Image: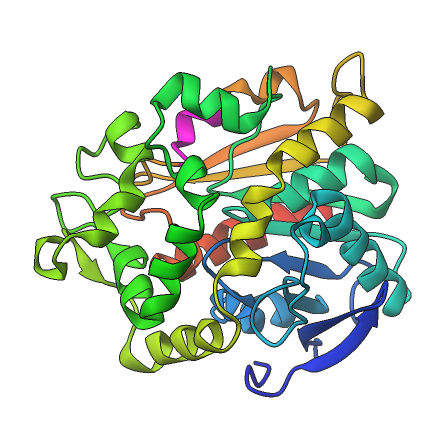
Amino acid sequence: MPDFNKPSIIDVNGVKLAVYEQRPQGVAKPWPLILCHGMPELAYSWRHQFEPLAAAGFHVIAVDMRGVGHSQVLPDKTDYTLAKRLGDMCGLLDHFDYQQAVFIGHDFGGTIVWGMGLYYPERVKALCACNSPFADMPMNPLDLYNQLYGPDNYFAYFQTQACEAKFNEDPARTFRFYARRDTGQGTNLSRSRQHDAESIAHVHWIHDDESTWPGEVLLSDEELDYYASAYGATGFGGALNWYRCLPLDYEHQKRVYPDGLPTITVPVLAVGSELDFIAAHHFYDLLDGYCSDWKKVVIENAGHWTQQEQPQALNAVLLEWLQTVAP
């Protein structure tokens, strides 16, 4: 497993990215695995995947996305568009002299793997989205969420400086709010255990007394300290800017594909979780309209943080799939 306190710092498109890697003991397979984390997360979120995936013969690479962790924090919101984050992934492949990779993304890291499949399919051997359903947006995503879920939705709150200030006020508390395991009464992501407007407005519960938060913290003190220290150093602004760029990402998509999205033809694995009610696994059932070669797997007894809640189950699913798509 890599030392998550001592990443390699590489220059990609003028941006310094923190990279963590583990190579197999023998000859590596031709395609590396690029692990893309979500929000609020880090490459560290994949700590349970490095060793089993490398043991299967893969060069495993994870990166702190621009704006978080040991990677460079950039000053402008427009530095965080999907187009630039996809450019980071292509630059990462070029740095290691790979033509293609298997991309595996969780949560908002899923936007990267889906984006690679749409915009750079020639660089993708296969892709896996964990807790990150995909569908074409009929309008600006911020407008769509306001229309579907009302003005208190988390996309809307993420646009505000008040949200950023609250997250930055006490990073450890922010991670205790998010990284929770469902013990039968939901979590701060969904107290109703339904994909509904109340759940999509979940972020406002961060203002409540911590004693009212359902579920239990799934991180050890050491793990919590790692996340809190990292985000304490950078703040949450970079990660929130990924969401603040959603209108720009939508405009870019419409410029590139004015007549609608192309079919994603690379093999796709869609991983959902039984107890994830935000990125609910039933939304993957829409993929027939977007992907020509895909399969869905649902991890039992896991919420939104699958690779940390049920790492062995996820690793088994990934390894079985990789035997087929990247033998």
Q: Nearer the viewer, residue 190 or 206?
A: 206
Q: Position of residue 187 (x, y in %)?
A: 21, 47
Residue furthest left as drawn: 211
The magenta segment is: 279-284
Q: Is residue 60 above or below residue 78?
A: below
Does residue 27 appear in the picture of this structure? Answer: no
Question: Quarter of the image holding residue 158?
Answer: top left
Q: Position of residue 134 (x, y in %)?
A: 57, 29
Q: Nearer the viewer, residue 60 or 155?
A: 155
Residue at the image position 62 percent from the left and 72 percent from the top: 55
Does residue 245 appear in the picture of this structure? Answer: yes
Answer whether residue 94 is magenta in the image: no
Q: Position of residue 21 (x, y in %)?
A: 68, 75
> Please, what is the dominant secondary structure of the magenta stretch?
helix
Q: Position of residue 316 (x, y in %)?
A: 48, 55
Quadrant (top left, top right, bottom left, bottom right) of the N terminus: bottom right
Residue at the image position 29 percent from the left and 26 percent from the top: 197
Q: Is residue 184 above or below residue 55?
A: above
Exactly how many numbered labels are in the figure? 0
Residue at the image position 81 percent from the left and 52 percent from the top: 87
Residue furthest front as drawn: 161
Q: Is residue 17 left or right of residue 184?
A: right
Question: Quarter of the image holding residue 95?
Answer: bottom right
Residue furthest top as drawn: 259
Tell me the colour scheme of the image: rainbow
Q: Nearer the viewer, residue 269 or 290?
A: 290
Question: Quarter of the image holding residue 164?
Answer: bottom left
Q: Nearer the viewer, residue 194 or 139?
A: 139
Residue at the image position 80 percent from the left and 12 percent from the top: 259
Q: Is residue 297 left or right of residue 137?
A: left
Q: Is residue 293 left or right of residue 180?
A: right
